[in-house]
Amino acid sequence: MPKPNPKAIARAAASYLQAHPDELLRALRSVMALRVGIPLAALRYIARELLTGKKAPRDLVIEAVPPGLRISATVRFMGSDLRAKVSVFLESVEVSAEKILLGTRIADLELEALGGDSAIAGLLKSGALDLSKPGNLLAFLPNRPAFIVDAKDDRIVVDVMMMDKLAAREGLRRALAVVTPVLKVASIRTKDDHLDVQLRASLENIGSAVAAARS
């Protein structure tokens, strides 16, 4: 996976703000409300920059279906090209220095085989796969990624910190150790083509945050 280009990101951000000056006012209101608003345009840009290569999803579409996200992409699976569409709703968030657990509900999963008579195409045509419970399908995958810690029915729990790119980043763990005692993530949901991260402040554990910063 290629590394992000800071200069390219800065140019893209400046261009976006120039075209959307209202974002600055929205960002100010968000700060006052202890909220971080991420434009979905930023997620689309990051996806285009990072998801490259022969095995990467193609024709990726990310759109808001408040309070969740609707994601569409063409993927290669079991020797067949599939057009996948899914709605993702974040129902629980648990963040600490050791883990970032996201409890998601998956809905409206659609898989369409794009040509060919592969095994997966036959299963989709026969209706043998129960797409209403994607967690059960994921649970039985022989090479299920380690960051998927639980999968059942329409629920999937992901530990972001177990992803290869983040697991070895000690700096991120140290930063979370300082921030998480006093700032908690209350919710993450979409609104007005933004992904809004609502924070909740608590000064009860400020001593832990100070100790972590000193260490």
Image: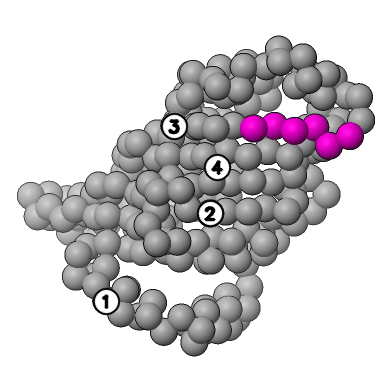
Q: Amino acid at mark 4?
A: Met
Q: CA distance from mark 2 to mark 3?
A: 16 Å
Q: CA distance from mark 3 to mark 4?
A: 20 Å
Vertical side of 131 occupied by 184: above or below: below
Badge nearest the viewer, 2 or 3: 2
Q: Residue furthest left?
A: 204
Number of numbered discs on residues = 4
Label 2: element kind: strand
Q: CA distance from mark 3 to mark 1?
A: 31 Å
Q: CA distance from mark 4 to mark 1?
A: 32 Å
Q: Residues within 10 Å of mark 1 (few under 14, many from 20)?
A: some
Q: Residues within 10 Å of mark 3 (few under 14, many from 20)?
A: many
Q: Looking at the image, do the residues carrying marks 1 and 2 touch, with CB atoms under 8 Å apart?
A: no
167 on left or right of 180: right
Q: Amino acid at mark 2?
A: Glu
- Residue 114 magenta-drawn? yes
Question: Which image quadrant for residue 131?
Answer: top right
Q: Residues within 10 Å of mark 2 (few under 14, many from 20)?
A: some
Vertical side of 59 occupied by 137: above or below: above
Of callouts 1 and 2, the N-terminal one: 1
Span colored in magenta: 110-115
- The residue beneath circle 1 is 28
Of callouts 2 and 3, the N-terminal one: 2
Label 1: element kind: helix
Whether residue 95 is visible here, answered yes or no, is yes
- The residue beneath circle 4 is 163
Q: Amino acid at mark 1?
A: Leu
- The residue sitting at 92% across, 30% down in the picture is 116
Quarter of the image with the N terminus is bottom right
Badge nearest the viewer, 1 or 2: 2
